[in-house]
Amino acid sequence: MSSTDDIDGYRLRVRVHEHVVTVHGREVNLTPREYEIVSALYERPGWVLSAEQLAGDADDSDYSPESVSVLVSRLRHKLAEAGAPDAIETVRGFGYRLRAGAREGDVTSESAEEGNALRDASWELQEAVLAVEHAGTDEERLHAVEALETARRAIEAELKE
């Protein structure tokens, strides 16, 4: 993403080149770290980012995975006050992501439907990969691998269309 890209969402807009986040056109006053978290989530719409990924540099003792949960809580509060209370979703045991639809901007309904189907299939694939990685028993791993294969086929089918 270039430094001049705008990332437009259904309620949120991140103006990368200005380090500004707006909700319904109103600027949201964020700290630099809160802005970094919003930007990271917007750069990967639908992807679950762990607290470790959002914490950034492992050598920086100021930002730990534990501090990310506090920052996300503050960020949610600020976004809710501005009119976007449901923008960030917690995926229990894995991390955070933007809720479905957060980056649906000014696209036609036909292209939005196509993009949504591929996005949904991508989310399912990502969740299946995480399930495989975190499976505790052989049975859980088998079910997770089956879900992974189903998600892979769904993406393949979407790409062929």
Image (spheres, rainbow, N blue to C red):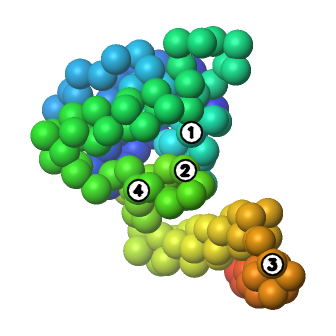
Q: Looking at the image, is 105 positioned above or below residue 158?
A: above
- Secondary structure beneath label 3: loop
Q: Residues within 10 Å of mark 1 (few under 14, many from 20)?
A: many
Q: Is any atom of residue 122 visible in this view?
A: no
Q: Which badge, 1 or 2, is on the more N-terminal residue? A: 1
Residue type at mark 4 is Glu
Task: Say left or right for 30 vs 150.
Answer: left
- CA–CA distance between discs 1 and 2? 6 Å
Where residue 150 appears, x then y in whole percent?
77, 87
Residue type at tag 3 = Thr
Q: Calculate the distance from the C-alpha at mark 1 to the C-alpha at mark 3.
A: 25 Å
Q: Vertically, is 48 above or below 27?
A: below
Q: Is residue 156 above or below residue 112?
A: below
Q: Nearer the viewer, residue 99 or 52?
A: 52
Q: Amino acid at mark 1?
A: Ala
Query: Residue under circle 4?
Result: 89
Q: Which residue in the structure is indicated by mark 1? A: 51
From the viewer's side, name the closer residue of 78 and 158.
78
**Image spot of residue 112 (x, y percent):** 47, 70
Which quadrant holds the C terminus? Answer: bottom right
Pick whichever of labels 4 and 3 is earlier in the sequence.
4
Q: Residue furthest front?
A: 137
Can you tell which of label 3 and label 2 is closer to the viewer? 3
Disc 4, SS: strand
**For marks 1 and 3 on the same chain, the one whose residue lies earlier in the sequence:** 1
Whether residues under marks 4 and 2 lie with C-beta atoms below 8 angstroms apart, the answer is no
Q: Could you tell me how far apart the alpha carbons at marks 4 and 3 are, in whole angstroms?
A: 27 Å
Kindly report the distance in space between the C-alpha atoms of the residues bearing marks 4 and 1.
Answer: 13 Å
Marker disc for residue 95: 2
